[in-house]
Amino acid sequence: MNKSRPLVGLPTLTWLRAFEAAARTSSFSAAALELRLTPGAISYQIRALEAHLGFALFERLPRGVKLTPMGVAYLPPVSRDELFGDGRGVAAALDLGAQIDLFRHARLIVAAHGGALANMLFCPPGAAVLELSPACEFRAHFCQLAGKLDLMHAVLPCQTVANDFQTAMQVPAPRLVVTLDVLQTRLALMDAAA
């Protein structure tokens, strides 16, 4: 696949749902059962997403599938557990060296305010970071750190379940899509200028 092809537009929600279910279950068949589709439909949607992104998300195995390193990197922004769960996400399953390597090559990070954003220390200059932050209380330390590391940083304020900094956030999907689109456009412009 062409790794240097710029992204044009955003992937469809159908592709993302298929990817997230297949990644979580490590199986196109299990994802198909969950989403009430055929395994062939899941495979088609994931191939379309991979073609859109320009890289493979899964390694196809005789029994099931396994995320590639790029698939592991792509999962957190589309994973419900990453946005609403305990915040550890897929990176927690990787050893420290693999986590550092993952972030050294990151161009765009989407993470809830918290420990996951500490990984931006390993990001290359010019990478984009979208912080999902509780609207009830803004804490600027990740914004300041991003500035010192020469990273593009944006904050998306999110309402919380109990209007408390420690409770689950309700991510406004339309604003998330627009913000991601703006960051991807800026990255593409930076790449074209380089």
Image: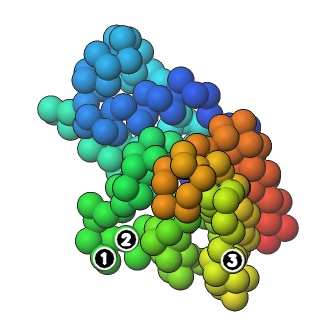
Q: Which residue is mark 3?
A: 140
Residue 54 vs 41, above or below: the answer is: below
Residue 145 vs 9, above or below: the answer is: below
The picture quadrant where one finds residue 171 is: top right
Question: What's the residue type where badge 2 is placed?
Answer: Gln
Numbered mark located on residue 190 in the image: none
Numbered mark located on residue 99 in the image: 2
Residue 20 vs 41, above or below: the answer is: below
Cα–Cα span, label 3 and label 1:
26 Å
Element marked by disc 2:
helix
Q: In the image, is 25 to the left or to the right of 156?
A: left
Question: What's the residue type where badge 1 is placed?
Answer: Leu
CB contact under 8 Å: marks 3 and 2:
no
Element marked by disc 3:
loop
Residue 107 location in percent, x, y?
Answer: 61, 64
Residue 52 location in percent, x, y?
Answer: 60, 37
